[in-house]
Image (tube, grey):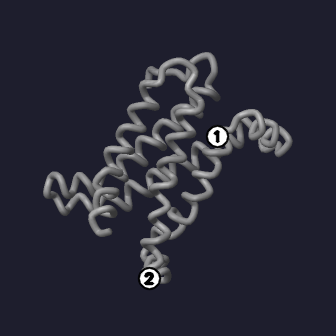
Amino acid sequence: MSESLGTDPVKALILLTGEWSIRLLILTLAVTPLRQWLNMPKLLRYRRMLGLYTWFYVNLHFLVVLTYLFAWDWRIAQEELLERPYIVVGFLAWLLLLPLGLSSNNRAVRALGRNWRKVHKLIYVIALLAWVHVFWQVRSSYFDAVLYGALILLLFYPRLKKVYETR
């Protein structure tokens, strides 16, 4: 690998894990609409795997922040949370994602029964929080934040349309 993490490797690592987290989240959300739009039911097989990749990267992002930004010092964490509201939003998204990751195995699906779907609908709130997390920390170019937001809205559209049609 010829690429380096540059002059600020901590920042680069935080950005890299965060970018892959939201990309994988969007890709996971894209499975169902793509399956319908492309008439490819086999795509559904990959949704859980993509969701678990998302969960892995979000946890990795969180661990990198805890380790290299907060140094596992709760006073530093408290200061950062007060100064940077996007961290609070990101933390909330992580908290909401925990039950999804923990319930993404066959045993948990069986144990939760119908409630499994209700728990996994949190993904929509998580996606919005993740987008706000990205948007609030933009310093120069809003391109990625706007792109992520547009993709999330595009992926939400068929779901929202379905909800309003059933009313």
Three-letter residue code for mark 2: Gly
Classify mark 1: helix, strand or loop: helix
36 sits left or right of 28 in the view: left
Placement of the C terminus among the 4 image quadrants: bottom left
Where is the N terminus found, in terms of image quarters? top left
Kindly identify which numbered label has been placed on residue 81: none
Residue 113 marker: 2
Q: Secondary structure at mark 2?
A: loop
Q: Earlier in the sequence, mark 1 or mark 2?
A: 1
The amino acid on which the numbered mark 1 sits, given as a three-letter code, is Val
**Where residue 155 appears, x then y in whole percent?**
33, 48
The residue nearer to you, when weighing 137 against 3, is 137
Marks 1 and 2, how far apart at CA? 34 Å
Image quadrant of residue 5?
Answer: top right
Neighbourhood count class around disc 2 (C-alpha, 10 Å): few under 14, some 14–19, many 20 upward: few
Nearer the observer: mark 1 or 2; the answer is 2
86 relative to 123 in the view: left or right:
right
Nearest the viewer among 21 and 155 is 155
Residue 75, horizontal then vertical, whole percent: 86, 42
What residue occupies the far right of the structure in this picture? Answer: 75
Residue depicted at x 82% and y 45%: 74
For the point 68% across and 44% down, the residue is 88
Residue ID for mark 1? 64
